[in-house]
Image (spheres, rainbow, N blue to C red):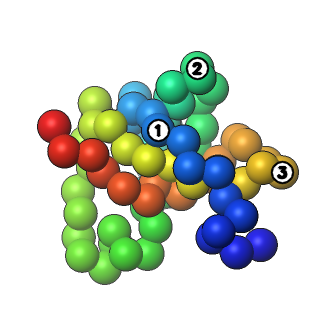
Amino acid sequence: MSKEDLLQIEGKITDLRGGGTYAVTLDNGVNVAARLCGKMKRFKIRIVVGDRVTVAVSPYDVSHGLIMFRHKA
């Protein structure tokens, strides 16, 4: 599956978990475990609790995803 097949959904960071995993509550109320995408790691973009983010979620498994973008405050 390529990145173009992923669903882009906005949400809010609610919790920091171990191993670089974040708990994200999406706008539709679903909780997702998400990790940073490669470009965010490369450019050292920091995420804190309360940030608005865009999460890419697979249509086959919506329980985890990739954080693709951090919105400006």
Q: Give the residue furthest to the left.
A: 73
Which mark, by number, is residue 10?
A: 1
Report, in whole angstroms, how far the alpha carbon at label 3 lies from the one at label 1. Answer: 18 Å
Secondary structure found at label 1: strand
Classify mark 2: helix, strand or loop.
loop
Crowding near pointer 2: few (<14 within 10 Å), some, many (20+)?
A: few
Q: Residues within 10 Å of mark 3 (few under 14, many from 20)?
A: few
Would you say 38 lies left or right of 63 here? left
Residue 1 coordinates in the image, percent (x, y) = 77, 72
Disc number at residue 54? none
The residue sitting at 44% across, 47% down in the picture is: 54
Q: Earlier in the sequence, mark 3 or mark 1?
A: 1
Question: Which residue appears at 24% of the width and 76% of the height?
Answer: 43
The answer to whether residue 17 is visible is no
Q: Are marks 3 and 1 in contact (CB under 8 Å)?
A: no
How far apart in space, not on screen, are marks 3 and 2 (Cα)?
18 Å
Q: Earlier in the sequence, mark 2 or mark 1?
A: 1
**Neighbour tally class for label 1: few under 14, some 14-19, many 20 plus, Cα within 10 Å:** many
Q: Residue at x 67, y 59 (%)?
A: 6
Residue to which mark 2 is pinned: 29
Residue extending farthest to the bottom is: 42
Q: How many marks?
A: 3
Q: Nearer the viewer, residue 2 or 21?
A: 2
User: x%, y% of residue 72?
Assistant: 19, 45
**In 3D space, how far apart are the residues under numbered discs 2 and 1 (Cα atoms)?**
11 Å
**According to the image, label 3 marks what residue?**
60
The amino acid type of the residue labelled 3 equals Tyr
In this rendering, the answer to whether 32 lies above or below 57 is: above
Left or right of residue 44: residue 11? right
